[in-house]
Image: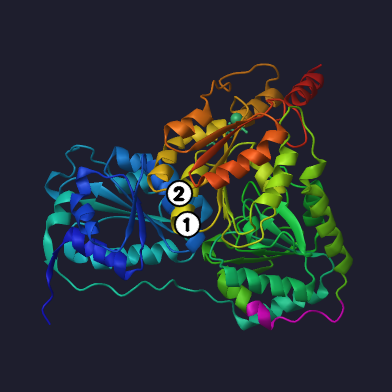
């Protein structure tokens, strides 16, 4: 059989189709015109973005929601460095992502040609793998490897550099076969050991985190938790891994978690850590477990053997993906008597009390407790909730009851500027679902330009923009460490409702609690991307304290 000769650009796009890609995000560049040309008549939805950071985050968001690599194309040099926050998020969040980057002509390499960058050096410590493709005939091999590397073990980002002249050169080469994610299953003996540990436990608890879950995997874990009446908590920004309205749910280990939950984990005799790494945030700055040998009996299940014993020495280490592990749980039998039953009930009751927004009051005319209570009524359970980084996000993280897998887009890397692009990525994938973008005033303007992308593609996401006129989180830390010495945290903001309108969206200013519900209804009805510019009293720095209280406490400690 003779193979048709194709350009590198065409071979590359054909590989994307082979691997099931149907969406890509990009900012165009002259360095990869041949790819753009091949995309012209391919069955792939292209989203052209306003900044590569936004494009990479959109792709990462899709990777998070689907478990398949998000795909992003950017130009060389500045395009690549602009995309780097998306790569870092994919690395810390264990999300499969492939970044294709333009590269200078092969004949010009190493001269510091226009926008030339050594991607292996620049992205070497962030990406799982970086490759320069110098021969179009090797594109099927390298692209196939990129999909395998991005999705196997602990998923993460891969960078594929594409020299401009390689993309226009022709080659005769066969397509690769579609990639198959490599599944890692637990051994029978390990499941038997787990059953033994559960049978002798008195105060067990499960912590769910990481990636390589799916809706069926979550369902299987729910069934396991039901059979064992096991209290289940979710790691930092992973609440979508267990339904909040389930009687086994004990809350999440985010920033500023329920102290009762923290005490419960410290007091547990058996901890099942499934998929997560218990990094700095969920481990409360590495205070929940002793290092390297936790006091609790630790069963750690992770798809990457390199994570097992990396920080915590597990009693039982299981190298398996949450998908495969949850399936194996079906063969584990509960003890004849469940001695921790009452503890599970108390844990859920503690969660319900902690997450009830109606109890919360803070300074200001716009009460976020009431806003959250309203959102719980007005926004459907399958809505995708997005946030970036900042104290504002605690309203969503603590008071929104996540009930389904694939409803949460929040960077465990703590990257500001994530929510707007994440919302665009989500809405592009699931146009029929409600997408809510939770943003701070600082957070939003780090990638607010992507509101234009939402307008361009008619993606009616609702941005709830909480404006307190500052980088509030940092101001909070300042007041605690250097009380009264405000430095570089004040922000003078634009009229965000006018911003939304200027872009062709729907905008509203919300100053009081009463204004919120009708404004939200109008935003949802508008059918346009919308911004609700919510004015938050700067004193309302967290759901539980004020800026002045933090400052006073710090000053008192110094007296
Ligand atoms: C990309 C990035 N830059 C800086 C920070 C440090 N940082 C964390 S929260 C924060 C302020 C967030 O401000 P805003 O979005 O207005 O939320 P607020 O804390 O005021 O609620 C900053 C600067 C970060 N996490 N990410
Ligand atoms: Mg702010």
Task: Where is residue 95? Give x, y as percent.
Answer: 48, 57
Q: Is residue 254 visible?
A: no
Task: Where is residue 61? Give x, y as percent.
Answer: 48, 53
| Residue 276 horizontal side relative to residue 163, left or right | right
- Disc 1 element: loop
Ligand 2 found in image quarter: top right
Who is closer to the viewer here, 208 or 52? 52
Q: Magenta: predominant secondary structure element?
A: loop
Q: Residues within 10 Å of mark 1 (few under 14, many from 20)?
A: some
Label 1 with label 2: CB-CB less than 8 Å: yes
Q: Is residue 332 magenta?
A: yes
Indicate the quadrant containing the C terminus: top left, top right, bottom left or bottom right: top right
Q: Residue at x 17, y 71 (%)?
A: 173
| Residue 154 horizontal side relative to residue 550, left or right | left
Task: Where is residue 454? Give x, y as percent.
Answer: 43, 45
Disc on the earlier residue, 1 or 2: 1
- Disc 2 element: loop
Q: Is residue 464 magenta?
A: no
Q: Residues within 10 Å of mark 2 (few under 14, many from 20)?
A: many
In the rendered structure, which segment of residues is drawn in magenta? 328-337
Q: Residue at x 65, y 74 (%)?
A: 220
Q: Residue at x 44, y 43 (%)?
A: 85
Task: Where is residue 105? Give x, y as percent.
Answer: 15, 47
């Amino acid at each position: 059989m003779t193979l048709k000769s194709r350009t590198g650009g065409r071979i590359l796009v054909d590989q994307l189709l082979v691997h099931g890609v149907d969406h890509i995000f990009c900012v165009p560049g002259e360095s990869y015109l041949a790819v753009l040309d091949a995309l012209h008549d391919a069955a792939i939805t292209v989203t052209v973005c306003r900044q590569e950071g936004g494009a990479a985050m959109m792709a990462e968001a899709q990777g998070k929601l689907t478990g398949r690599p998000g795909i992003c194309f950017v130009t060389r040099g500045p395009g690549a460095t602009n995309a780097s926050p998306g790569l870092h998020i994919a690395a810390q969040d264990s999300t499969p992502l492939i970044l294709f980057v333009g590269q200078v002509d092969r004949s010009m390499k190493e001269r510091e040609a226009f926008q030339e960058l050594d991607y292996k050096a620049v992205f070497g410590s962030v990406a799982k793998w970086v490759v320069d493709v110098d021969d179009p005939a090797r594109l099927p091999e390298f692209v196939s490897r990129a999909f395998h590397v991005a999705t196997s073990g602990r998923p993460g980002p891969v960078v594929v550099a594409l020299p401009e002249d390689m993309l226009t050169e022709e080659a005769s080469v066969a397509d690769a076969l579609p990639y198959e994610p490599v599944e890692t299953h637990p051994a029978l003996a390990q499941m038997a050991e787990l059953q033994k540990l559960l049978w002798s436990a008195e105060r067990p608890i499960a912590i769910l985190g990481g990636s390589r879950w799916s809706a069926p995997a979550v369902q299987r874990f729910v069934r396991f938790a039901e059979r064992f009446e096991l209290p289940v908590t979710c790691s930092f920004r992973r609440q979508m891994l267990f339904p909040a309205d389930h009687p086994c749910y004990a809350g999440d280990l985010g920033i500023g978690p329920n102290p009762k939950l923290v005490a419960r984990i410290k007091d547990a005799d058996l901890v099942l850590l499934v998929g997560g790494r218990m990094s700095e945030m969920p481990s409360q700055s590495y205070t929940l477990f002793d290092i390297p040998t936790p006091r609790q009996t630790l069963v750690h299940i992770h798809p990457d053997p390199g994570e097992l014993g990396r920080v915590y020495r597990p009693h039982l280490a299981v190298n398996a993906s949450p998908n495969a592990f949850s399936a194996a749980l079906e063969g584990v039998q509960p003890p004849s008597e469940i001695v921790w039953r009452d503890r599970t009930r108390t844990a859920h009751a503690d969660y319900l009390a902690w997450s009830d927004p109606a109890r919360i009051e803070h300074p200001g005319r716009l009460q976020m407790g009431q806003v959250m209570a309203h959102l719980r009524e007005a926004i459907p359970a399958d809505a995708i909730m997005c946030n970036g980084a900042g104290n504002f996000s605690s309203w969503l993280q603590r008071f929104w009851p996540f009930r389904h897998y694939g409803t949460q887009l929040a960077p465990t890397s703590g990257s500001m500027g994530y929510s707007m692009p994440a919302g665009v990525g989500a809405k592009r994938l699931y146009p029929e679902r409600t997408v809510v973008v939770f943003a701070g005033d600082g957070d939003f303007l780090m990638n607010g330009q992507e509101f234009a992308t939402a307008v361009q593609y008619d993606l009616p996401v609702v941005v709830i923009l909480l404006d307190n006129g500052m980088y509030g989180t940092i101001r909070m830390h300042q007041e605690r460490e250097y009380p009264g010495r405000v430095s570089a945290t004040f922000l003078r903001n634009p009229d965000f409702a006018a911003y939304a309108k200027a872009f062709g969206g729907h905008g509203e200013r919300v100053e009081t609690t009463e204004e919120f519900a009708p404004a939200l209804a109008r935003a949802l009805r508008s059918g346009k991307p919308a911004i609700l510019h919510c004015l938050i009293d700067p004193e309302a720095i967290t759901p539980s304290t004020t800026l002045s209280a933090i400052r006073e406490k710090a000053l008192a400690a110094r007296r």
